[in-house]
Every structure is written in structure tokens, then in C-alpha cells.
Image (tube, grey):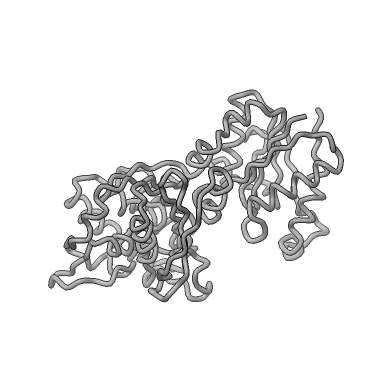
Amino acid sequence: MKILVCPDSFKGSLSSYEAANAVKEGILKNSPDSEITLLPLADGGEGTAECLKRIVGGEYRKVKTKNIFFEELDGDFLLLKDGSAFVETATASGIMTVEKPRLNPLKASTYGTGLIIKKSVENGADRIIVGLGGSATNDGGMGALNALGVDFLDENQKVLEPSGENMIRAKSVSIRDEFSKYKNIKFTLACDVENPFYGKNGAAYVFASQKGAGEKEIEFLDRGLKNLSEIYNSFSKKDIQSVSGSGAAGGLCGGLYSFFDCEIKSGFDVLSEKAGLEELIKSADLVITGEGRTDYQTSFGKLPFKISALCKKYGKRCVLLSGDISPDADIKGMGFESAYKIMNKSITLENAIKNAYNLLVETAKNIEVER
């Protein structure tokens, strides 16, 4: 029996690598002769760099950068063997860079992510993949662009601090000489959302509340994004609002797209292509995937659903193993043969998070490997 184990991370408890190993350990307890291949995956957010490193190799380069509030932070990027670099937005501009009570997208900036991009170019990278998941920002990319040589000016031609609250105050841009260093860099913007830059389905209205914004702040940020899009359009002649995914990472995707040579790809697709995922699925008898919590949103393109779709394409069995499964999750409709979860009435959420590895091992023991 050839089994492919390719989970996402179980956010808050296990990395995708830890989850994959726990599943393998559980399966081997009841099916010791199984041939198991592990392929930990991610969707472009936190942990994507580590998955990529395990798949294709590479070397982490340490850099000094700034967090979302311009405070000193130790960061890194992954320099791949082909000379390209992978930069995780979450490293400098992520929710985990500050304590949760401090989150405030009005004051937050992607400046630190721009500094990491800058350092990766100084290390010789001419192709950069930017993982856009897990951000705590909603600045339309002002911060990252500022670090790369773009100044945002107010009505008096004064340079603005690049943060969410200043999007609405920007009237024009001024390009510094250093910007020329990056104009030939090719960017791949890795994300798994299709939200536009602004509007009811845009960066602010959909994502800003989880970054600390209230109702009035969300409306204010959305107006700022709309203003910024007009500035970007006038500079680049690109209609950024019509670009699918431009609202990713609080509009960082749209900001970079406006100024550089960019393609937008699913973070899942970036990893799956590097890993040769489709060939691995074709050669497997059973595929096991999973995530921390499965609900109706999983069918909107989350990693396990995409794995299931590939399994359907090649006529392979696909089993889901999650921390918890919501009643609104249509397991059969999403193409899973069966589904297993850690949570039950006897296990509290706190216990499930604390003992996630061992509980996942025990849950994986129940998977019916042979049909």
C-alpha cells in the first residue's frame, strides 16, 4: 500500500511537517507494511518557506528588519538553489510579530517585508517569490514599496509614513533612485485568496477585523485602499482593482503588482509544482491530507480541498484528517472518501492543542488504509 501524506499545518499546534509525521506514526501502528511518502504543504502563509526548503533545498539568510510598527526585528528569507528567493510576509509583517492586544492595521506597515525583499536582492536574487499569507497589515503595500524606493506624498508634497491610516492622505508618489535596482526583478506573488483591492469583498472589509480593526476603521481603511488604487493606476496604467487577489495581505499584493513585473499564483500551486505533487498522487494508492479545522470555507479553495480535487482528477482515494470538523463541512461534497477528527466530547480545545501530536497519532490509527 503506497500512501501519500500531505497535510497543511494545524495552526496553533502543529506545523505541517509535525502533522505529517504524526499521521505516519499512527498509520504504521496498524499497517506496518505501508510505504509512506510525506509531503508537508502550505498555502503561501507562515510555514511555506520551511515546506519549500524541505522540497527543493536552499539556505536561510538572516537579516535585520522591522516589525509592523517599525520596531527592530530579526528576520530571514530562503535563498533557493536556483538563485531565487522566497520571502514570507508573515516573517516581518505577520500577526505573530506583536502581541495580539497591540494589533492595529491603521498603524501597521509592510515596511519590514520590503526590507527583506531588498536584502534578498542584495544577496543576488533576481526572482522573488513572496508568500502573502498571515499578515497583520492593511497598508496597500505602501510600506514594502517605501522600503524599495517609493515615497508617498500628501497634498503638501510631504513624505508620509507608510501605514494603513495614511493611505487616504496620499496624493502622489515620488520615485527615489534606488528603485531602479528592483525594476528588473521578477516577482511571483503567492496567495490563495481572490479578493480585490477594495470594496465589500476587498482587503479591509474581509480581513481587517481579524487584524484589530473595528467597523469604522474598516470603512476608513477601505476608502484609503480605493484612493491608493487610483494613485497606483495613474502610475502603472494597471487597473489594480480588476486583478484577482490584489487584496491579499492587506493589499500588499496589489501594491507590488502595480510597480513590478509580477505574476500572481496560488501558494499551493507554487509548492505543488516544485514538489511534483501530481506525479506523487498518480503513484499513490491512498492520499491523506488535513488541517487544523475543516468547515464550509475549506471548499473555497483551502489546501485539503485542492488535494481532494487532484485525487479526483486521477481517480485516487482521499482521506481527510483534521483537528476538528464543523457540521457545515460537506465532506462527501468536497470529494473525501472519509474524514477523521481529533476533537470529541471528552477532549477540550486546550487539551487538543497541548497534546495535538499524540492525539493525531491516535486518530490516524483509525484510518481504514485497506478498503
Q: Which of 345 and 370 is in front in this view?
A: 370
The image quadrant that residue 120 belongs to is bottom left
Q: Could you say where residue 204 lies in the image, as x and y percent from the top left?
A: 39, 59
User: Is residue 223 among the parts visible in the rendering?
Assistant: no
Q: Could you say where residue 264 lies in the image, as x and y percent from the top left?
A: 38, 43
User: Is residue 147 among the parts visible in the rendering?
Assistant: yes
Q: In percent of the image, x 27 and y 64: which residue is there?
A: 146
From what the image shows, is residue 63 above or below residue 244? Answer: below
Position of 138 compared to 134: left or right? left
From what the image shows, is residue 201 above or below residue 145? Answer: above
Q: Which of 2 and 158 is in front in this view?
A: 2
Position of 3 compared to 159: left or right? right
Residue sitting farthest toward the left:
156
Q: Could you say where residue 344 lies in the image, as x and y percent from the top left?
A: 79, 54
The image quadrant that residue 38 belongs to is top right
Residue sitting farthest toward the top:
315
From what the image shows, is residue 51 above or below residue 150? Answer: above
Tell me the quadrant of the picture where the C terminus can be found.
top right
Q: Could you say where residue 141 lies in the image, as x and y percent from the top left?
A: 33, 59
Tell me the quadrant of the picture where the N terminus can be found.
top right
How many labels, in total?
0
Q: Which of 3 and 215 is in front in this view?
A: 3
Q: In percent of the image, x 53 and y 67: which residue is there?
A: 96
Q: In percent of the image, x 30 and y 54: which residue is there?
A: 255
